[in-house]
Image: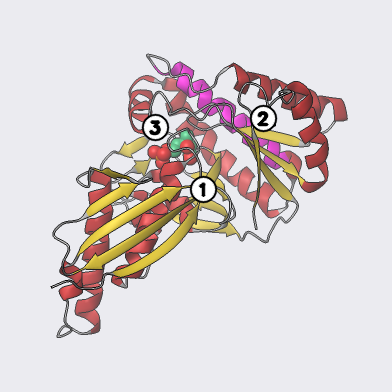
Amino acid sequence: SMEKPNIVTCTAPVNIAVIKYWGKRNEELILPINSSLSVTLHQDQLKTTTSVATSRSFQEDRIWLNGKEEDISHPRLQSCLREIRRLARKRRNNVDPGLDSTGLSHKVHICSVNNFPTAAGLASSAAGFACLVYTLARVFGVEGELSVIARQGSGSACRSMYGGFVQWIMGQQSGGKDSLAQQVEPETHWPELRILVLVASAERKHVGSTSGMQTSVQTSCLLKHRAESVVPGRMEEMNEAVRRRDFTAFAELTMKDSNQFHATCLDTYPPIFYLNSVSHQVIHLVHRYNQHYGETRVAYTFDAGPNAVIFTLQQHVPEFFQAVQHFFPPESNGGQFVKGLPVKHATLS
Ligand code: PMV
């Protein structure tokens, strides 16, 4: 007989790391070699929307990403499903061992869509796994520290479980229980902060973060130095810059950390190139812009792709926007910027 499925829909935003995560000490549990810190965007901007349906009549777990069915046996997807069901079972046993638990054996159908290009180095896996874990938790009535589960889907996903400024503490334990995300400051903390995404290319990235990190950990001594001797101090400085809303300190640490991350990619053997010539022009533009005003008004950061994420303060947005248009003039017949550089505005709250 047909049974009406139970459906839950949630959204999760992208987060942008200002102190980068790159490198795992445990591949299976996704335990990082250094802590990281990020800014979570507003729900309405770059986000994933996930619906999870459960029904007694479903024969197997299935998943669709942006309308296309994908392989449910993906190991990290399986980790998240297994962990949520384990916690749901545990909770149900604690609350009432006699409770009917048939819902737990129900199969799920998962539908997930991004409102931005997938795998273009725009942290799509972060929003995706955060949203998946959050939605599954709602479906199965699981509460508690969900960032530990999201982490096992994609490392950076643990940071999208919170809004505002978020740190992922690397943790010490081998089991990974203490490798979790914490909100440093809420989204309301710094209302003037603005984020612009300069899309240099919407193509899929050439080297995925998983294999890129593996090669970097195996071959880059700069990465080892970074994780052990640079990031711990930077995490403290960044926490402090965010707490004090010190844009100059925040911006300079952000740019230096992005540059060091891409330097470790070059130090990887064979080297990994995520930036393209448009990215390099954006870096150049930002430094010239700041030099022109004699103060640091704008910062860039790049993840595993060529698209620039720009941080600035509200009062500088129109002016910097003009500088971008000057450097990358709009085409006469489109409304687009040449070299495929549309600008997306994003805010924090
Ligand atoms: O979580 P992953 O495997 O997509 O790795 C993300 C790595 C970076 O985006 C480059 C840095 C970060 O901290 O988000």
Q: Is mark 3 within 8 Å of ligand 1?
A: yes
* Cα gap from disc 2 to disc 1, whole angstroms: 24 Å
Q: Identify the mark at residue 323; answer none if there is no mark.
A: none
The first of marks 3 and 1 along the sequence is 1
- Please tell me whether mark 2 sits on a helix, a strand or a loop: loop
Q: Residue under circle 3?
A: 209
Query: Residue 240: image x %, image y %?
Result: 66, 49
Residue found at the far top of this picture: 270
Residue sitting at 51 percent across and 28 percent down?
261
Position above or below: 69 against 136: above
Choose between 43 and 229: the one closer to the eye.
43
Q: Determine contact: label 3, label 1, CB under 8 Å.
A: no
Query: Residue 100: image x %, image y %?
Result: 16, 81
Residue sitting at 36 percent across and 69 percent down?
138
* Cα gap from disc 2 to disc 3, whole angstroms: 29 Å
Query: Residue 34: image x %, image y %?
Result: 44, 40
Residue sitting at 25 percent across and 73 percent down?
4
The first of marks 2 and 1 along the sequence is 1
- Please tell me whether mark 1 sits on a helix, a strand or a loop: loop
Q: Identify the mark at residue 14; answer none if there is no mark.
A: 1
